[in-house]
Structures are given as structure tokens and as C-alpha cells.
Image (cartoon, helix red, strand yellow):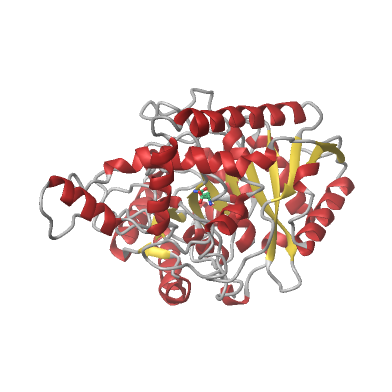
Amino acid sequence: MIHASLKDLSAALAAKKVSAVELATLFLDRIEKLNPTLNAFVSVDRDKTLAMARDADARRAAGETGPLLGVPLAHKDIFCAEGWLTTCGSRMLSNFVSPYDATVVRNFKQAGAVTLGKCNMDEFAMGSSNETSFYGAVKNPWDTARVPGGSSGGSAAAVAARLAPAATGTDTGGSIRQPAALCGFTGLKPTYGVVSRYGMIAFASSLDQGGPMARSAEDCALMLNAMAGFDERDSTSLERPVEDYARDLDQPLAGLRIGLPKEFFGAGMDEDVRAAVEAALAEYRKLGATTVEVSLPNSGLSVPAYYVIAPAEASSNLSRFDGVRYGHRAAEYGDLNDMYSKSRAQGFGDEVKRRILVGTYVLSHGYYDAYYLQAQKVRRLIADDFAAAFKDCDVIMGPTSPSTAFRLGEKAADPVQMYLSDIYTIAVNLAGLPGMSVPCGFDRQGLPVGLQIVGGWFAEAKMLNVAHQYQRATDWHLRRPALAE
Ligand code: GLN
């Protein structure tokens, strides 16, 4: 059962082969056993989880059905969940018990899913290694001396080691896809506006997007069906007809045109990553796809533009954490300003402070035009590049991350090296496009490699189809770390 897909768990529940309480207990026991090694969860609350499971069983006994009724899953600790500690990986929120549910959490509750706990993450989702968390680094289940990627590193380690069959994540510059690649499972960042950001603690509001992290594309489709949808409480939520994201999974790929951006296959990528991605492309050709070179000429500007725009938005979003309404407040202080400054100095870690400083600087009078406005113009150019490329192809493919999982501490002292881990993912967020990472092999040390699939706006169903057909032909997504046996 621990290794079953979400789809199989759903079928077992429907056939009454297992109850929601039995499943929740199975995963809670596993969390108890493996979390001390991995540090994937910040909070686990057995009583709350079992109460939800009992409720799901009662709903089924009363005749209710539904694909997620009784299915256990974990939430990144950026999603507010009523009655749960919601820390966002920060000391600032170490005492914050949310009084309400994020829309994503509420959607899963309505579908009858059972919350296994809240997953560790980089502080306020800033990072690519899960080393900036106030709650300590998360370990990669494939090699516990290595990072799981970030910022959704707790969700990633939980899914890879099967502490949870699936988890939610958020992706501002790569935080679903990069950890999915480094931990060897499937993750999808939807088109901006498809999943509500209400109750998802804001980092960079014009980039943040929640999405599913699960073993397979099929399981991601199942989750996205519950996550997506218009929400009047999020002003950037898109009003679109409800979709079944699983509808095209079984479509054959004959005739599919795959665009390969020449900028994504240049220098800077590990040779083992390159080999695994090339092998995946060969597999796609066998499935009937053709490949065509495309160009994203401004993609080299995506990391610099992102590191102006994201800190600018973060500096504004994080101004609400002032020690007054909720969150950490310094125990001793003089006047009001001293209370603000001591509370923030104590509550935030170094990376968050760095971003607030950069963001405040680029938004300040006299620098706004030179940095922020300029970055917004670059952002438009990047989106236009993608639109032009999609004239020649249906999906774009390349590596998700330039390397496999790096060692804990290896990049922690060098922010720029860390920022470059997202060199292939960030442009997708700047353009608001959907992106996925799918396991496509291993390096010579046995660490997983991810293939990135990028679709046009609202092409999620197509991308899931493209990923699912590959997963029917290969078994990379079924491999698991020794620790997870
Ligand atoms: N690693 C990137 C950053 O540090 C992206 C993080 C994310 O997607 N939340 O900002």
C-alpha cells in the first residue's frame, strides 16, 4: 500500500479494500519512523489526521464517492490550514496557528482528502535546497548527505520516500519542478492563475503558483482536478470552464512536435543530465514525436530579471510581518519602531533579509526605472520568446535542473550559485506558463535526473498526456530510493 499510486489507493478505498483510517495510520507510522532522518515534516498531528480519516470513512459509508475521498496527502507549510501550525519555514510564524483554510486546502478537504501533516520548506519559499528553513535542512532520500532541492523540499522528500503518496507544493521560480527532479518524481506548476493563491502565504505574487507533486503524471492530474478552479477571493484567479486534466492522458503522441531551445542545451549542464535528457528525447521519437530546434533568445536574462522582480514583490509582501497582528514579537523592545525592527531582525533568516534589502532597493525612488521597470520589460520579452517558439512546436523540453542533487552545504554560502540552480525553470514563471518535471534517468552516482516539459498557456492536459505516455513506456518514475523500501 505504501508504494501504491494515488490512483490505486483511490481504487482500493472505493472497493472498500482499505479504510481511510487504515491508510492514514499506515502513513503516519511511516512518518514517525522516517521523519527523524529526513526532516520532511514540520508538523504532524495524529489526532487531527485520524479525525479527518474517520470523517472520510463516514462520508463513504453514507454513500458519498469521489476519487480523493479518504486519500492521504501532505501540504507544504506555505498553505494555511485551519487549526494547524502554518510556519512557512520561518521563525516569524513559528507560533501561527491558521484560523482558516487556503482555497487549495479547502478544495482537498471538500474532496475528502486526509491531511497527513505540513511539510518543511525553505523560509518563505526562498531557496533551492531547503537549507534556509528555520526548522533545519531536509535530506534527500536518495542520499541523505544531499539536498532534496527547494523550496518545496519537505514535500519532495515526503513523496520520494513515500511518507505521503503525494503532496502540494508551490513554484515561484522552480520550487515544484527542481525538487521533483532532484528527488525523482513528477511535479507540475500550472499556468499562472489556474490554482488559487488565497491562503497561500505570498512570496512573489505575480509568480507564485501552487501545484501537485506526486509519483506520476496520472496522479498529478488527479490532484490538479481538485486544486484548480476559479476563486473569487484571489483577484488573479482566472475564470475558466472547469477542466478534467486527465481527459487526454491516453492520447497517442504520434505527430507531437517537441521544441528544444538551443539555450537550454548549451554549456553549464552536467554531462550525465544531458545524457539522460537526450535518452528521453530518443524515447519520445520512438513514441512518434519529432523534435525541432527553437530559440528563447532572452532566456539568459531570466535569472537576473527574476532576482529583481521576486525580491521587489517579497519586500512588499513581507512588510505585513511586523510583530503586531500575528507571528513572532521580540520579548524586549523600546518604542514601536524598535519593536518592529527587533521582531523582524529575530523573526527572519539571512536569505529572507537579503531579499527584503534587494527588493526595497530596486523599488526605491531613483532606482525603480533602472531596475524594476527594466526587469518587467525583460519579462515581456521572455514571454514573447515563448509565444514565438510555440508557433513551431507543441511542447518545449529540456533539463529541469543543470545538476542532480548537490551536497548539503555545498552552495549555501554562495547565493548566486544557489540562484543558478533554477536557470531552466525561472523563465517559465516569468512567462506565466505551465511547466512539469518528469523523472528520466539517473546520473552515475545513482541520483535522479528530471526532464522539463513546458506547454503553452493552459496546456496542462496536453503536458500530462505527454508525460503519461512517456511513463507508460519507461519506469523511471517507479524507481525508489533504498531508504523507501
Ligand atoms: N529558488 C528560487 C528562489 O529562491 C525559486 C523559489 C520558488 O520557486 N519558491 O527564489
Q: Residue furthest front?
A: 366
The C terminus lies in quadrant: bottom right
Is 484 situated above or below 376? Answer: below
Lateral position of residue 409 relative to residue 250, left or right: left
Location of residue 201 (image quadrant)? top left
> Between 192 and 129, which is closer to the camera in this rendering?
129
Give the percent coordinates (x, y) of residue 380: 61, 27
> Between 322 and 360, which is closer to the camera in this rendering?
360
How many tags in the picture? Answer: 0
From where the camera sits, is residue 193 visible? no
Give the percent coordinates (x, y) of residue 41: 41, 64
Give the percent coordinates (x, y) of residue 78: 39, 50
The N terminus lies in quadrant: bottom right
Residue at left offset 52%, top offset 57%: 415
> Between 425 and 34, which is closer to the camera in this rendering?
425
Is 241 situated above or below 116? Answer: above
